[in-house]
Amino acid sequence: MSGKLSKALHKLTHDTALYELKRLYSYDKKSVLSYHDTLYLNIIEAHPNKYTSSQIADLLKITRPSVTEKINQLCKKGYILRTQSETDKRVFYLSINPDSPKDYETTARYEEEMEREVLAKFGEEKVDIFCEMIEFLSDLMFEDFREENENE
């Protein structure tokens, strides 16, 4: 296979970054989101009500005040909601505001279109295998991430 998967993953990462930047600078001229904003929104959207600002700071190994400032900005812009923990009133979990400004929905529509095209080309069975592979890769990445945090 000689690095075929590595090359494909590198291309996917490259093309995803280009897509995000192009979308921000071309398609969403009225958007008030920066590239970093969209990355934070992607983290929160993938796991609603899982992370707090402090947990994101710890995961990213950056200062808590810088994450809190970014989250406060996104809350003020209407993109993020904070939900208070039922067990610890000092803790607030983050989620995407369902009433967020519509410029963020561009990505969701694009992802739905991509899903339809991939299903049409490869069929349900191959897509299921691909999803399993993505989950496996994601677990591998976070395994490395957890090991880094444990070693500190």
Image (cartoon, rainbow, N blue to C red):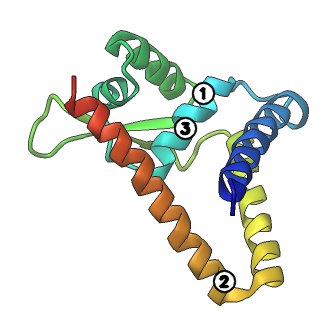
Mark 2 nearby-residue class (10 Å; few <14, some 14–19, many ≥20): few
Separation of residues labelled 3 and 1 (CA atoms): 6 Å
Q: Nearer the viewer, residue 118 or 1?
A: 1
- In the rendered image, the quadrant that contains the N terminus is bottom right
Query: Which kind of residue does numbered mark 1 sit on?
Result: Asp
Mark 3 / mark 2, whichever is N-terminal: 3
Q: Residue furthest right?
A: 26
Mark 1 and mark 2 residues within 8 Å of each other at the beta carbon:
no
Q: Which residue is mark 1?
A: 37
Query: Which kind of residue does numbered mark 2 sit on?
Result: Lys
Separation of residues labelled 1 and 2 (CA atoms): 33 Å
Separation of residues labelled 3 and 2 (CA atoms): 29 Å
Mark 3 and mark 1 residues within 8 Å of each other at the beta carbon:
yes
Q: Which residue is mark 3?
A: 41
User: In what element is the residue under mark 3?
Assistant: helix
Mark 1 / mark 2, whichever is N-terminal: 1
Measured as percent of width and height from the top left, residue 121 is found at: 83, 81
